Amino acid sequence: MSDKRGGVLGLAGWLSMVWLVLVAGGALLAPYLPLDDPSRSDFLVPANASPGTGGHLLGTEQNGYDIFSRLIHGGRVSLVVAFGVLAIGMVVGGSIGLVAGFLRGRTETVLMAVVDIFLAFPALILLIAIVAFLGADLKNVVLGISLVSIPAFARIARATTLTFSRREFVVAAEAAGASRWRILVREILPNVVLPLLAFGLLVVAIAIVAEGSLAFLGLTSQETISWGGMINGGRRALQQEDIAHTSMIPAGMMFLTVLAVNFLGDRFRAAFDVKDAAL
Amino acid sequence: MNDNQRRARRVLTAPTSQDGPLLVVDDFYTHFDTPGGLVKAVDGVTFSLERGKTLGVVGESGSGKTVLARSLMGLLTSRNVVRRGSATYNGQELVGAKNNNLRSLWGTEMAMVFQDPMTSLNPVMRIGRQITEGLRYHLDLPKEEANEQALQLLNSVGIPDPKRRLTQYPHELSGGMRQRVTIAIALACGPKLLFADEPTTALDVTVQAQILNLLNSQQSERHMAMVLVTHDLGVVAGRTDEIAVMYAGQIVEKAPTRALFANVRMPYTEALLKSIPKLEDPSHTRLQIIGGRPPDLINPPPGCRFAPRCPYVQPKCHTEQPPLVEAETPGHLFRCWFPVGTEAGREALASNLAHHVPAAQAAVTGDSAAAAQVEVAQLVDSDPGGNA
C-alpha cells in the first residue's frame, strides 16, 4: 500500500512534500538554527539592501532586518495557523456534521440552519470584524479563521455521514446488535475522517492565505513575524522606490507553500478516494 | 464474565430441541407512508418457521420479499414505516418492540446476510476486527479467544489461509470471499434464526452455488432456522423445506418444497417456473416472460393482484380477492379462483385462448407482442385520466 501511495504522489508530489518539510522543519527549529536575529537591524547595510549584500542571503527589508531569517521565523505563524485551523475546524465542524447527518430530524435542521447562516456571511469581512473586535493577536486570528472554516467542515462531514449512514455495512452492524454510539464511532467516523482530512489540506492553504491577508491589512500584532506582515511592510518600498524583493520574496514563499499544500492535498484526495469499485 | 458463564452461553447456542416454531408471523403488515399514498409492501403475511428448517421466500422485484425480511428483523427504522399484525420470536413479540430490546436479539439470536457483499463490509476496518467485534461485544470474549473464534469461523465458511485474511481489508477480497466473510460475521454469535436476503444476487453464477451450499451446510450444522429470500426458484428448489411465493406484498402460494414443484396451483408460480430457461431447449428459444409488471402497491387491484397479468383470468378475478385455501396436500396453500391443474383452471385458460386474451396468448405461445399488450392494458388501467 505504501509504495503504491509513493507512486501516486509522483515527482511534483514529492517536491511539494520536500518543500513543506523544509518550511515546517525550519519553522520548528528556527530558534536553534544559525540565523541572524530576525528583529535586529543591521546598520552596516542600507535598508532594503539587495539579496547578497553584507552576508544577507536574501537582503534586508525596510528596517534592516534579515529577510531570510524573517522568512524562516514567519513560517511559524503559518504553521500555527494551519494546524490550529485544521484541528479546530475538523473537530468542531466534523462533530457538528457527524451529529447532524447521523441523528437527522430536528437536530439536523437546527444545526444546519446555524451552519448555513455562518456560510452566508462574507468570510473575509466576518474575519476582519472578529479580529478587529477581539484584538489582533495570533490566538484570535486562529480562532477567527477556524470559525469561518467550521461551516464548510460541517457540511462536508454531514454529506459524507449521510452517504455512509444508510450503507449496507452500517445496517449490517445494526443487525449484528451494535449500539448507535458504536455505529457512529466505529463504522461511520473512520469513513468520514479521510474525506474530511483531504478537504482539510485545502483549508490549510486557504488559512495560510487568510492569515496573510489579515497581516497585509495590518490586522496582526506588530511583534509577530509573519509572511503577510512582511509583504505589507515591503509595500511602501515597492510603490515609492521600485524595490521589489522585500515584498516579492515573502509573497513567493507564501505562493510556493500554498501551491505545495494544494498539490499534496489533491494527490492525497486521489489516493484516499474510496470509490465503489475499490470498496 | 467467568469461564462457567461463558460455557453456559455456549451450551445455549448449541443445538437444542425446541417446542413449537421459533418464528411465528401472523397477519403481518408493513406499509410505507409516502406523499403518494400508503405503499403496501407487505400486506398480511402469515407463516411459521421451526429451528432447523429453511423457508424460501420467492418473488420478483417489488414483491415485498426483502421488505418482509428487513421488517421482521426490525431494520426498517425510518419514521414512515407502519408495521401491524404480529411476529413473535421464541414467544417474544417483535412488532412494536423497542429497539433496545431488539438489539439484545440481533446478532446473538437472529442475524442477517445481506445482498451485496461489496457494500455490507466496512471498507476501512480489517476483516478480523469486523468478525471479532460481535464476539467481544455480545459474548464478552477476551481478545485472543475472539481471534481464535474468528479463525475457526473463517475456516468453517471455507476461506483459505484465514490467518492472513484476518488482517486484510475488504477490498483485498473477491466478491465470493466477501460474502463468505459476511456469513462468518452473521454466524459469529451463534444466531438461531438467519435471514439471507438474496445472498447470491450480486455474485458470479459460479460462486452462487458455493455460497448457497455453504449457507445450507451451516444451517443444518448449527440447527438454525433460515429464511432464504430470492427471486430465483432454482435457488430454493433443492435447499429449502418450504417455499412461500410472494406477489404484491402477499403470499400467493406456500407449500413444502416438494409439493410445490409437484403440484403448482397458483398461475403466478407457474409463470415464474416457466420463465426459467431450460438447458434442453434448443438455442434461440424465446425466453418465456410474464407480460406486464407488478401492480402499484399504493392502489393494488381490488380482486386478485395477479389478475391483470394472469393467463387464467376470469371476470371474478378482477372483483373478488381469492383467499388462501389449502390444496389436497396438507400445508399447501394458494390464492386462486381458477387454480392451475384443476378443471376450473383448464376451462378458464381455454376460454381465454378462444377469446384472444393477451396474457393467455403470451403465456401459451410465448408471443412477445401479446406480452406487450398486457403491459399497455395495465398502463391504461392505472391512468385515472384515461388519456393514455
Image (cartoon, rainbow, N blue to C red):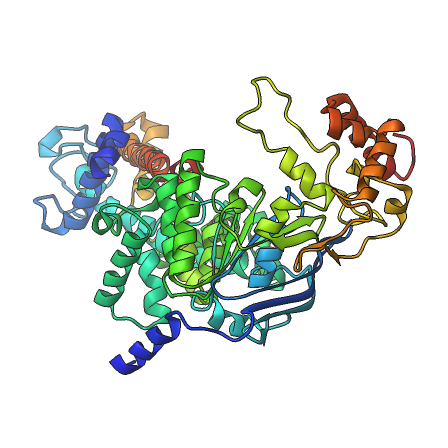
Question: Picture quarter containing residue A206?
Answer: top left
Image coords of residue A201 (percent x, y) = 36, 43
Question: Picture quarter containing residue B160?
Answer: top left
Say above or below: A198 vs A253: below
Q: Who is closer to the viewer here, A267 or B153?
A: B153
Q: Who is closer to the viewer here, A104 or A25?
A: A104
Does residue A91 show up?
A: no
Say above or below: B94 vs B230: below
- What's the residue at 71%, 42% (across, down)? B268
Q: Who is closer to the viewer here, A119 or B115?
A: B115
- What's the residue at 87%, 45% (across, down)? B318
- Please state if B151 lies on the left or on the right of B305 as rendered: left
- Please state if B115 lies on the left or on the right of B373 as rendered: left
Q: Who is closer to the viewer here, A94 or B31?
A: B31
Q: Residue furthest top?
A: B284
User: Total marks drawn?
Assistant: 0
Question: Which part of the image, by quadrant, shows the C terminus of chain B?
Answer: top right
Question: Which part of the image, by quadrant, shows the N terminus of chain B?
Answer: bottom left
Does residue B297 show up?
A: yes
Image coords of residue B9 (percent x, y) = 35, 76
- What's the residue at 58%, 49% (across, down)? B258
Image coords of residue B105 (percent x, y) = 48, 70
- Please state if A245 lies on the left or on the right of B65 as rendered: left
Say above or below: B191 vs B348: below
Image coords of residue B168 (percent x, y) = 27, 47
